[in-house]
Structure formats: structure tokens, C-alpha cells
Amino acid sequence: KNEVEQSPQNLTAQEGEFITINCSYSVGISALHWLQQHPGGGIVSLFMLSSGKKKHGRLIATINIQEKHSSLHITASHPRDSAVYICAVRSIIGAQKLVFGQGTRLTINP
Amino acid sequence: DTAVSQTPKYLVTQMGNDKSIKCEQNLGHDTMYWYKQDSKKFLKIMFSYNNKELIINETVPNRFSPKSPDKAHLNLHINSLELGDSAVYFCASSPGLAGGTDTQYFGPGTRLTVL
């Protein structure tokens, strides 16, 4: 079992819908990242969280350290939000490398 | 100006060849990384350098050798390429140490196909 699990693996929704992507992890962490990988392949960092909640435009990320769980929400979704969303955690042990989830492929239809 | 650049973008080569991928960042960051993304889109760390010093070396075959001539460059050389090396390789950089909590900035990726 991977240390970082995302759900769902695939998500298709209509434009305007509220989207939630979940990430659960099994290790102690110092930070959690949400990344977006565009259909063209480029990767962009969206958020880095160690507690609480962050908001950027229509994107909101939350983390619950006790439950080892984070969610990424997209409000008023748009076709341009279609991408793969990747959760990654920085473990507090070892070399503190980033460990990635398998990604959630989001498709927003017009 | 591109923050993290990689060359080449595409690389098609025969099994057994030796090839290099170059990465440069103009952000003044101290730490650089190489990641491999397999056909299932899983990203995995391969190496990390901080100020030209190797700090993360995952379980990667020793056919892969990173080289950091200065803190703005981290190149990846691969000897005796195998079919299983086919993947997209991403370079990234971050301001501080790999153990810190900095945002990472990714290059555009290099798609390597081994025939």
C-alpha cells in the first residue's frame, strides 16, 4: 500500500460543480503539497500546507493532521481546471523527501 | 524567462546507449531534484542536490549518475539505457534544504523513449 492514497482516481463533472479531491497519508509529515499537472505535462505547485486551510482563487486546500487527511476543493469548476491533481507529503523521517500519491484525473465538461 | 528549464524535451534512443538530460534553474535556489514519472503517472524522487552536494539518493540503478557543476545546474546521465527507463523525467528546484517546507518549481519534463 502506498504511503499516500488519493481518491477518487478519476473524476468527471459538469462545469460549475463543486469538486473535492481527497488525500490520506500514513506517515508523520512536516508538510503536504498539492500539485497540478496539465494535460501538456507541466507540473505546477498549488499549495503547501502544514496545518489548517489555504485559499487561492477558486481553490481551497485543507489539512487535518490528527486524521492524516487533506482535501482539495474547487468551487465553480471550469473546463480549464481539467488536469491531474497530485498530493505529495514531506515525511519527517529519513531524508524528508516528497512522497507522491497516484494522482486524481479531473475532467470538467462544458 | 523560464524558471526551470530542461533539455531535451523529447529523447528517443536505442537500448544500450548513453544519454544525458540537462536542467538549469535561474531562480537562485539552493536545492535541485530529479524525479521519474512512470507510465502510470507515479512521480518518484531519484536524487536531490543542495549547493552541489548530493543529499537524497533513492534506490536508483547506478547506471544513473547526477552531476551538479554549480547550484544552478543538475544534469542526469544514464548509461546502458534499458526499456524500463522509458518515462518522463522532471527536474525541480526549491529555495532551501530538501528537508525544509519550501515550494518546489518543476521543469517541463523530458520524455525519454528507449526502443
Image (tube, rainbow, N blue to C red):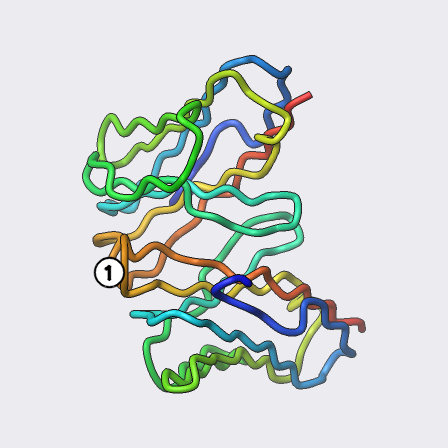
Q: Position of residue A40 (x, y in %)?
A: 64, 48
Residue B98 drawn above or below residue B20: below
Look at the image and tell me in which quarter the N terminus of chain A lies.
Answer: bottom right
Tell me if I can see residue A98 in this picture: yes
Q: Residue at x 41, y 41 (%)?
A: B46
Q: Is residue A78 above or below residue B59?
A: below
Foreground pick, B61 / B85: B61
Q: Residues within 10 Å of mark 1 (few under 14, many from 20)?
A: some
- At 46% across and 34% down in the image, what residue appears? B6
Horizontal side of residue A38 vs A65, given as left or right: right
Q: Is residue B17 above or below residue B87?
A: above
Horizontal side, residue B49 vs residue B59: left or right: left
Where B26 sits versus A48, above or below?
above
Quarter-wise, where is residue B28 in the image?
top left
Secondary structure of the residue carrying tag 1 is loop
Residue name at image x 22 percent, y 54 percent: B96
Q: Amino acid at mark 1?
A: Gly
Can I make out residue B1 in this image? no
Q: Position of residue B110 (x, y in %)?
A: 54, 34
Q: Position of residue A11 (x, y in %)?
A: 72, 72
Residue B15, given in percent of the width and then of the height, sits at: 62, 16
Q: Which residue is mark 1?
A: B100
- Which quadrant: the C terminus of chain A? bottom right
Q: How many marks?
A: 1
Q: Quadrant of residue A82?
A: bottom right
User: Mark 1, chain letter?
Assistant: B
